[in-house]
Amino acid sequence: MSNPLSRAKFIDTKLLGRKRTVVEKIVSEEEIEPLMKELETDTTISRDEVKHTCQELFEKVINKEEVVLDRKFHRRYLDLAFGSTLPPQLTALDASQPWMLYWIANSLKVLDPTWLTDDIKNAIQEKIFKLSEVPHQGGPFGGGVGQLAHMAGTYASVNALAVCDNISGCWDKIDRQALYDWLLALKQPDGGFKTCLEVGEADTRGVYCALTLASLLNILTDELREGTVEYLVKCQNYEGGFGGSPQEDEAHGGYTFCAVASLAILNSLDKINLEKLMEWCSLRQTNEEGGLAGRSNKLVDGCYSFWVGATSAILESRGWDSSIDKKVLRDYILICCQSSHEPGLRDKPGKHSDFYHTMYILFGLVITENTFKDQGGHLCHNIEAKLIDSYKFIPSDLQGINPVYGLPIDDTKLFMNHFRNIDKK
């Protein structure tokens, strides 16, 4: 047997090497490269710029409690869309015509219901029915005249009609049977829904649009529900949020909202990891800006005040605490998402306002100023909003919203009750 001591000596001298003397060296700060320098990306550079810009805006405000929404100023931006020809740059949104109607009409309605006049409501409903796959019929609807019927275009069309107060009997023109048959044709064996018969993809957006349409119109059946809860549960990933498809995508604010709102409609929120979901929502709020981002390591964007904020509000309506700091988010919206030089609301400082961000940021602002409670035994159309009294602020005087359907509370109830009353006869 070999001598253990000699083996230890071999290991010490041959394997670990000789002991070296310590060398001390004084270096200047210029020679030290920070660790984060090695991790610098386009995103981190942009994030630093956004943080600094937001901080400059915050420092200019003497009292955040006195910052208000410039309602009439933003109305000018919305009225412009209905009162003049849109610029040629918006040609890119040719397939989003019902969406623009939904964004603009919904914004006016939440600011002040009287601002959406009967003339505008009539013009909206006339336009919507021209977008039907069969022109002047009751749906399903495409994104533009002569375009294929699409789940997203149909969702936006029906929601736009929902805020029109049944002007000219427009609600009764919706062909619910045709829509139901179309939704069944889009239903997939795994419980999901395609967005379009010919070329559509299947993800949580399709599920949300389908379930929203069916529940609003009172055509939600067991056949449409079948397998959908299981499909959605598989879309929650290790982060706590939801991806677009089962066990495939990273969590995203838009996909997460669609999944959570869908589960709320199906009364199946208890089937998912709610604590992990709430943690994911909380982590989307940045410390410096106070706004919400849609994914990990992404920039804040005002639209996620709704997508992530409404996800939190849905959980709040079922008795859970809010996952976000509403006061801080409200500061971001009012100080960083509106400008005194340009009407409408914007993604973040340095961006221009647009119809999409204007509506979703307004809805996000409603979420920051209210608490939410489901008053009707987990029936989503009975969610109520109550003005917060836990911190001081000047209310924006916006209409309460239903965070599941993305519509003002009163309009949601009127629209849904209209079809329920018909079906009772």
Image: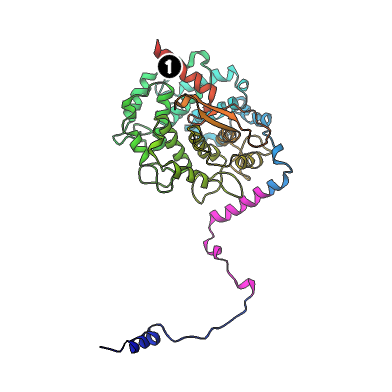
Tell me the crowding category of disc 1: few under 14, some 14 to 19, or many 20 or more residues within 10 angstroms, Cα based: some
Quarter occupied by residue 349: top right
Decide if residue 162 is on the left or right side of residue 52.
Answer: left
Helix, strand, or loop for circle 1?
helix
Quarter occupied by residue 272: top left
Which residues lie in the magenta part? 28-55
* Residue at 36%, 85% in the rendered image: 8
Between 91 and 310, the residue placed more toward the observer is: 310
Q: Where is residue 354 in the image (x, y as percent from the top left)?
A: 58, 36
Q: In which quarter of the image is the C terminus?
A: top left
Q: Which amino acid does label 1 sit on?
A: Arg
Between 294 and 43, the residue placed more toward the observer is: 294
Query: Which residue is under mark 1?
Result: 420
Between 157 and 143, the residue placed more toward the observer is: 157
Q: Is residue 150 visible?
A: no
54 magenta-colored: yes
* Residue at 64%, 41% in the rendered image: 331
Main SS class of the magenta portion in the image = helix
Q: Position of residue 418 (x, y in %)?
A: 46, 16
Decide if residue 110 is on the left or right side of residue 132.
Answer: right
Q: Where is residue 268 in the image (x, y as percent from the top left)?
A: 39, 33
Q: In this view, does 199 lie above or below 157?
A: below
Decide if residue 114 is on the left or right side of residue 372.
Answer: right
Q: Position of residue 77 (x, y in %)?
A: 64, 31
Decide if residue 255 is on the left or right side of residue 101.
Answer: left
Quarter occupied by residue 232: top left
